[in-house]
């Protein structure tokens, strides 16, 4: 029974609590945009789908290639949590899919002082002899009340939890996630100008034109592209038009003719733009 009593404080300290950490430690990537008002979004009509993630970077690429956009993510370290909390947060965000990750973080150990009651009972008995030869016997008990402090050792596993939240988008104008050039890519093309393609959305105009992940877009209709914002503006101004892109790939320059879609407003998520 004492062993059970010792464990109760530890269970209280180290077990999960009512706080939804997926909501508490959520980071928004939409810039505070109200997704419900975005005409590009396909709002879910069923329960959010829960997926066990494997590799965060690969999973992100696969999701954007399927036409999903990242709303945000949750990340925290804790001893135990429930996947139902991730689904609850996905519902709050109107997310279509939530991908969760769990990796071992560390195993803290130590001891906790626990004070327990310490009651001792003594039994007494004996005989008393009188000076005239008579005698008598006696018996009884006495109780001493006190406390005793013990150090209860513990160790427990903590895990890093992560969840990414996704929503389906309508067919984009071009169909690429792009970003500004890194220092390495600037040296590669020997220019500060251009954008690089992180992912190509399947069945989009870019997909059917065989644009590839890693391509660097240098020109739009012979206009030199300054950065991702400039590129997105050029795309928006030419919705539904046939355009020409000059692509740098594996040391070669390639020209691509692309018929773009209509009615899509570009979206910026973190440092990337979907157009």
Image: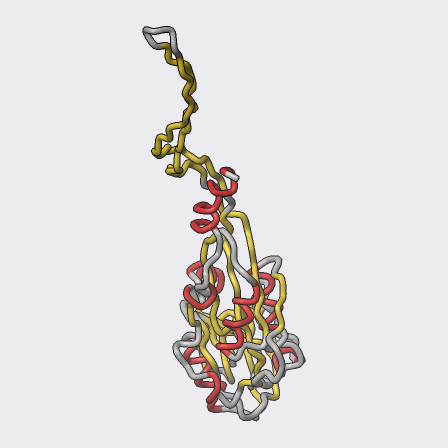
Q: Position of residue 187 (x, y in %)?
A: 45, 60
Which of these two is toward me, 225 or 200?
200
User: Does the image show residue 254?
Assistant: no
Q: Is residue 180 left or right of residue 1?
A: left
Query: Which residue is most to the left?
Result: 131
Q: Position of residue 66 (x, y in %)?
A: 63, 75
Which of these two is toward me, 191 or 112?
112
Residue shown at the point (52%, 80%) measured from the top left: 94
Give the tally of numbered discs: 0
Q: Position of residue 168 (x, y in %)?
A: 58, 80
Q: Position of residue 75 (x, y in %)?
A: 46, 60
Residue shown at the point (57%, 82%) measured from the top left: 169
Which scheme is used to colour this image of the protein? secondary structure
Residue shown at the point (47%, 38%) measured from the top left: 154
Residue shown at the point (60%, 85%) measured from the top left: 171
- Above or below for 125 versus 97: above
- Snapshot quadrant of residue 263: bottom right
Which of these two is toward me, 124 or 134?
134
- Above or below for 162 versus 28: above
User: Does the image show residue 167?
Assistant: yes
């Amino acid at each position: 029974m004492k062993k059970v009593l010792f464990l109760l404080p530890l269970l209280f300290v180290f077990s999960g609590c009512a706080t939804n950490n997926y909501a508490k430690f959520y980071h928004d990537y939409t810039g505070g945009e109200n997704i419900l008002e975005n005409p590009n979004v396909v709002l879910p009509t069923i329960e959010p789908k829960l997926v066990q993630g494997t590799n965060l970077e690969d999973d992100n690429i696969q999701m954007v290639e399927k036409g999903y956009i990242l709303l945000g993510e949750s990340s925290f370290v804790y001893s135990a949590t429930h996947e139902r909390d991730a689904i609850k947060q996905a519902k709050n965000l109107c997310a279509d899919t939530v991908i969760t990750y769990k990796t071992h973080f560390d195993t803290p150990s130590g001891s906790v002082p626990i004070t327990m009651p310490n009651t001792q009972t003594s039994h007494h008995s004996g005989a008393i002899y009188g000076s005239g030869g008579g005698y008598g016997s006696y018996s009884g008990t006495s109780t001493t009340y006190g406390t005793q402090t013990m150090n209860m050792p513990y160790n427990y596993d903590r895990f890093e939890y992560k969840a990414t939240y996704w929503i389906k988008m309508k067919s984009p104008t071009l169909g690429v996630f792009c970003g500004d050039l890194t220092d390495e890519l600037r040296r590669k093309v020997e220019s500060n100008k251009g954008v690089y393609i992180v992912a190509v959305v399947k069945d989009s105009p870019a997909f059917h034109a065989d644009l590839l992940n890693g391509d660097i877009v240098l020109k739009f209709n012979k206009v030199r592209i300054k950065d991702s914002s400039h590129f997105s503006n050029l795309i928006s101004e030419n919705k539904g038009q046939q355009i020409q892109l000059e692509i740098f790939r594996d040391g070669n320059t390639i020209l691509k003719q692309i018929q773009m879609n209509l009615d899509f407003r570009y979206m910026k998520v973190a440092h990337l733009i979907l157009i």
